[in-house]
Amino acid sequence: MHSKKEIENLQNTIKIILEEGNKANATAIEAGISISSGLQTTVRLGQVETMEFTRDKSLGITLYKGHKKGSVSLSDLSIEAIRSSIQAACRIAEYTEEDIYAGLAEKSLMAKEIPDLQLYHPYTITPEDAIELAKTCEAEGLAADSKITNSEGGHFAKYESTYAYGNSHGFLAGYQTTRYSMSCSLIAESQNGMQTDSEYTLSREYGNLWDAKTVGQQAAFKTIQKLDARKIPTCQTPVIFAPQMARGLLRSFIAAISGGNLYRKSSFLLDSLHQAIFPHWVNITEDSHLLRGLGSAPFDEEGVATRKRNIVKAGVVESYVLSSYSARKLGMQTTGNAGGIHNVMVEPSEAVDLNQLLIKMDTGLLVTDLMGQGVNIVTGDYSRGAAGFWVEKGIIQFPVQEITIAGNLRDMFKNLIAIGADVDTRGNILTGSMLLEEMTVAGI
Amino acid sequence: MQLSPLDIAKKQLLEPANLSESQLQTVLSSVLGYSVDSADLYFQSARNESWVLEDGIVKEGGYHIDLGVGVRAISGEKTGFAYSDDIILPALTEAATAARSIANRGQQQSIQAWNKPIIVKSLYSEVDPLQSLRDEDKISLLQKLNKLARSLDNRICQVTVSLHASHDIILVVGSDGTFNADVRPMVRLNVNVIAEENGRREQGSSGGGGRQDYQMFLENNLGESYVQEAVRQAIVNLKAKPAPAGLMPVILGPGWPGVLLHEAIGHGLEGDFNRKGSSAFTGRIGERVASPLCTIVDDGTIAGRRGSLNIDDEGTVSQCTTLIENGILKAYMQDKLNARLMGGVSTGNGRRESYACLPMPRMTNTYMLNGNHHPEEIIASVEKGLYAVNFGGGQVDITSGKFVFSASEAYLIENGKLTYPVKGATLIGNGPDILTRVTMVGNDLKLDQGIGVCGKQGQGVPVGVGQPTLKISEMTVGGTE
């Protein structure tokens, strides 16, 4: 169903939209369409629980009348729907006010070539195949240990999507992506109550998924490890963020250097460009063209060419994360991040895995779960619910829960001691574990 | 004569596609023909708009429309689901074919005769809220609020004000005879400000809304009161000192801090988790889960509230369900599927984000009833502790029972008096026992202003919370001191 033809179809619809915009006397117009289809299934205790077929269309149009702007979005791609939405966008643009920073991204920055980033790997999976995978994955988890007493299920999902974007500079392009995932979520029980944990695998390519057995067994292992978790006394202690948690820290950093938060003065990293925010050994790059990358894109949502660049070099912020609008507000140039950040690569500080990092920490807290939204990007204040393991002499002693960890992101970034090489590649932020000098733990 | 929700839904959803009731019956029958116990169709038309003022100008306006139909087929514990964003017979038939594919061929079953709704008084007006104010008046409201924020205190350096409205028309047709519709308005106004003093910046935010129209913000200067509140909060936070860390008594203010109830016990009482035995509350009906001072309800029937519904997304009429009465667990919140599998009936809590998502048990407006203490007495009873009055979001692990919620405005209590504001901090506790530590309940029940969005399995739905001032004898506060 998906093919180059699909991209052409969307591009033809965009051409019509651009013409209609022209007829409506728009100064400039841009449109993006994405269509996707997929299936997802959950099998619980060996029985199919849900089988969902997804099929989505979405069209977004933004038009400008001088420096006034109106946006519409819809799921109906018919010509009648397009015409009436353009009318609606024009009406909105009558009421919004002149904003001299509003407009398309600069024509000279439009992507000239659309590299093949190997993001599209179609593979036929029937509903029966999907059920079988979810079933195997869960069965392996349930069989792994007698302490596993219940399950939230094995899950498999597949998506294919086509995206096209065009604007009145004459830019018009599209690309396709696929995404496959499998996960297992289990429950273990002891006299001290129940615990749940899960494991997942995620890839652009079906063949690159971990096998169902690994996912199930790993989920069981993680769940059992959490049994009999306890609280610890309130203290100051070194903390290791496991890779998935370290990704969250990086996400807060990216939010704090994002254009929207900067021009709204809603960031604790205002004027951080060319400032040392991390220790001198920290290097962070954005690689938008990483082959098969989960965050890869040949151009951003304004048609701007994406490229590889340094975000942090030797601990110093080298570049913000900007769209054309936030860039103009800050007197800078877009970094090709309309729609968000692409792949963020964090360089390990040394070739150590998590075990070696535990030894380096000696005594402290390994955080494997975080809860809640207690991160204030305006002030950098950080306070979140946590669970993980207490570590002494480099060895895990017992699981910990119902505690909080708190600090200020500015100090936390400065006090990084090491970044491991145990990089988690299941996302658009690729980082290993992070060892921080000290945080406040609140418990009993 | 005013059209009923069912007339409006038929006119908006079925007529343009020339879909007749008998065609819907045929589609449902085709699904049921496959050893499927029950099936339903959910038609939806959603329109919404937003207007955003930032840096002193209304720079953005957006209009969104979405239309579609979801088809669900249930066979025992299995659910097959497919949807289409075209409401036309061929698309509906195709979705039905996909949905029923979970079941093996089996004997023919029959669908119940349509059970047309009894006309009850709607909890909200059928007026399209998008049309309830002229566009130029929406703009001038935003501008007026921006000017007010900047005039209240010269430390305010950034103001963002936004207006949203949505108009949702839904029609649920089920093989159990359900044939019911709802026309749901929603408005919301948000104010966010940043205050700056000596290089320190802090934010304050406020807002509200409900299943009403834009006029609600003009009446009693409600919009202005949100601005005053956001500015006050930002200025208070400029003086906030680091929050304490560790176990201590915590007093929660009335209204929005009821997010405690939503996280600590609400999710754990949703039927799906209890059917699967994954909730820390599984099998505990009839047991004491809270102090005798606590009575908590989930009430979808309050007129005009954000979490209210005339009918849920399975066509069941909303109700007020007592979850906990004087500390004893009384009921779970159910949708049709989980109620049937647990041998009960739906409590009107079957909700979905849209036609493209499956319904599941969700909260509506969840709140605790009044006790008999004056809020002042409650504060005076604490030697050293935390008084938290505003919160950001929360989260819960329903299996371990651990939950968090993050204070955005809090004060230190010393010797029964509020001494100074402290920075935001996350509070963490254990759902099944936190309410056993409620030692005082105020007589000042308040519902929140209408800002809550609850997320579950990726689906967001509007909800409400509320509570009187309450004292928790001991809870972990996640500060730094």
Image (spheres, coloured by chain):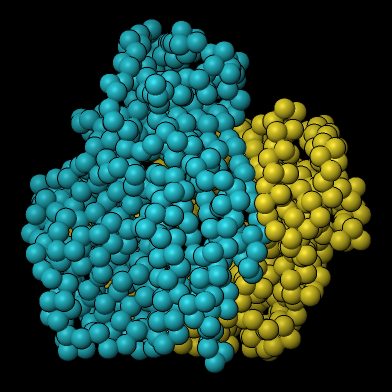
Quadrant assignment, res B38: top left
Chain yellow in the figure, letter: A
Can you say which quadrant of the picture contains the N terminus of chain A? top right
Q: To which quarter of the image does residue A305 belong?
A: bottom right
Q: Quadrant of the C terminus of chain A?
A: bottom left
> Taking A428 as reference, is B276 above or below it?
above
Residue B267 x, y percent position in the rendering: 31, 51
Please state if A286 lies on the left or on the right of B368 as rendered.
Answer: right
Residue A214 in the image: state x and y as whole percent.
51, 51
In front here: B358 or A50?
Answer: B358
Answer yes or no: is residue A254 visible. no
Residue visible at 78% across and 55% down in the picture? A302
| B481 vs A418, nearest the viewer | B481
Colour for chain B in the figure = cyan
Count of number-bearing discs: 0
Residue appearing at x 71%, y 50% in the figure: A93
**Residue B239 percent location from the top left of the image:** 41, 87
Q: Residue at x 41, y 57 (%)?
A: B208
From this viewpoint, is residue B252 visible? Answer: yes
Q: Position of residue B468 (x, y in %)?
A: 20, 63
Residue found at x 41% / y 14% = B32
Q: Which corner quadrant of the image does residue B466 belong to?
A: bottom left
